[in-house]
Image (cartoon, rainbow, N blue to C red):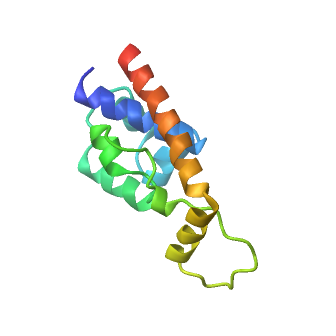
Amino acid sequence: MTFDKQIGFRLRAFISHLNITQQAFAQRLAITKGYLNDVVNGRKGIGVEIIINTAKEYPELNLRWLITGEGFMLELEKMYVLPPDELPSGVEEGVKIEYLKREGELERIKRLLNEHEQRLRDLEIKG
């Protein structure tokens, strides 16, 4: 599988994860659906501008994963479930992440993402 096809495969997986259409994704990045379709199908390279715009619009996306396939699709530290209402408003993200670590939620998320990533790798090998 070519480099462009690998990135396209991963970008398609991310769009699927977002549960949005390619049209909606393209609109959010201010690119045409046709160009996005060429990228996700490996006919065109992703381009620096799309990578930068994607990083701005979707900070939870792990760019290392998108480009190399290494690591997880999502930056776990940027994903968290809001803590219970008992915590005061204005609590910093780091505190929320610590809350999740105490409750074991972050480990559960890591395990689920690892399983998801393995399924993607299996599909990539078959494709």
Which residue sits at x=51%, y=34%? Answer: 115
- Please say if 112 is above or below 38: below
Q: Residue furthest right?
A: 85
Res 27 visible: yes
Q: Which quadrant is the N terminus positioned in?
A: top left
Viewer-nearest residue: 17 or 57: 17
Q: Point out residue 13 in the picture as x, y percentages from the top left corner.
A: 47, 35
10 on left or right of 90: left
- Please say if 28 is above or below 41: below
Which residue sits at x=59%, y=64%? Answer: 100
Q: Quadrant of residue 52?
A: bottom left
- Please say if 91 is above or below 78: below
94 on left or right of 7: right
Which residue sits at x=67%, y=84%? Answer: 89
38 on left or right of 100: left
Q: Point out residue 56 in the picture as x, y percentages from the top left corner.
A: 40, 61
Q: Point out residue 96 in the picture as x, y percentages from the top left corner.
A: 58, 72
Q: Which quadrant is the C terminus positioned in?
A: top left
Which residue sits at x=28%, y=42%? Answer: 67
Q: Residue furthest top?
A: 126
Res 50 visible: no
Picture mark count: 0
Viewer-nearest residue: 6 or 54: 6
